[in-house]
């Protein structure tokens, strides 16, 4: 049986893809765009290049593009200044744009109790402070960090050698200098 093609009615409207607010010409192409102190490649799509910012994954970048009504498949180099400012504003306060809280990487902060999303060096700083706090209060995870063991319940029978690559394997002693027969006779 041959498949029949269904024809769409004449008044059928395709979903138009969103695009950048001010369409750029090929003359205005920029190879690098700076967002959140990170240089983004202008030749890659917007969704792909946003993932180069530490703290933004593919799902989060897709959410940014869809909530700001930007075309995620268009090359980043054609973005206008207004679109860059929209993205930076979004990254500063994502809750203002009704992003679901489960997408945030810092929910119910221990110090403030607020939800937020951290990027770049702030993410590293807060993570190191959290580890220091766990070590200080000697929680189970803190003790595992102190010992250099896996923290999240992985097995340790066959993996997780401590300090991989540092001083492992057969160690050869330094050659001992042999004393000459003349040196032995001097002692007598």
Image (cartoon, rainbow, N blue to C red):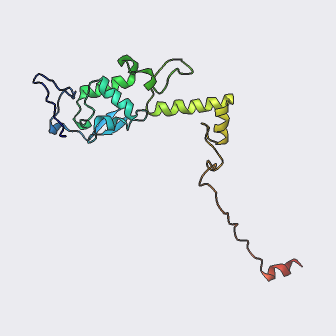
Does residue 29 appear to the left or right of 170 in the view shown? Answer: left
Residue at the (53%, 29%) spot, across then down: 126
Residue at the (47%, 27%) spot, across then down: 105
Measuring from the top left, give residue 86's x and y in whole percent.
29, 24
Using the rendered image of the protein, determine whether residue 160 is visible from the camera's viewpoint: yes
Residue occupying the far front of the picture: 1
Residue at the (19%, 40%) spot, across then down: 1
Residue occupying the far right of the picture: 188
Does residue 21 appear to the left or right of 183 in the view shown? Answer: left
Measuring from the top left, give residue 13's x and y in whole percent.
15, 24
Can you say whether 14 is above or below 152 in the image?
Answer: above
Using the rendered image of the protein, determine whether residue 93 is visible from the camera's viewpoint: no
Can you say whether 135 is above or below 161 in the image?
Answer: above
Residue 25 location, quadrant: top left
Give the position of the C terminus as an image quadrant. bottom right
Measuring from the top left, give residue 162's x and y in whole percent.
64, 48
Can you say whether 67 is above or below 150 in the image?
Answer: above
Figure label count:
0
The answer to which of 103 and 53 lies nearer the viewer is: 103
The answer to which of 34 and 19 lies nearer the viewer is: 19
Residue 67 location, quadrant: top left
């Amino acid at each position: 049986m041959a498949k029949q093609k269904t024809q769409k009615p004449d008044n059928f409207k395709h979903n138009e893809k969103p695009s950048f607010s001010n369409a750029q010409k090929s003359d205005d192409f920029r190879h690098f765009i700076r967002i959140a102190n990170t240089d983004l490649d202008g030749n890659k799509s917007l969704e792909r290049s946003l993932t180069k910012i530490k703290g933004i994954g593919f799902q989060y970048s897709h959410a940014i593009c869809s909530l700001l009504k930007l075309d995620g498949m268009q090359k980043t180099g054609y973005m206008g200044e207004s679109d860059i400012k929209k993205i930076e504003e979004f990254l500063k306060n994502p809750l203002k744009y009704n992003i679901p809280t489960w997408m945030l990487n810092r929910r119910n902060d221990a110090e403030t109790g607020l939800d937020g999303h951290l990027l770049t060096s702030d993410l590293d700083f807060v993570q190191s402070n959290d580890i220091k706090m766990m070590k200080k209060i000697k929680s189970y995870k803190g003790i595992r960090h102190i010992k250099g063991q896996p923290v999240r319940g992985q097995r340790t029978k066959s993996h997780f050698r401590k300090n991989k690559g540092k001083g492992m394997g057969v160690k050869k002693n330094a050659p001992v200098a042999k004393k000459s027969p003349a040196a032995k006779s001097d002692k007598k």
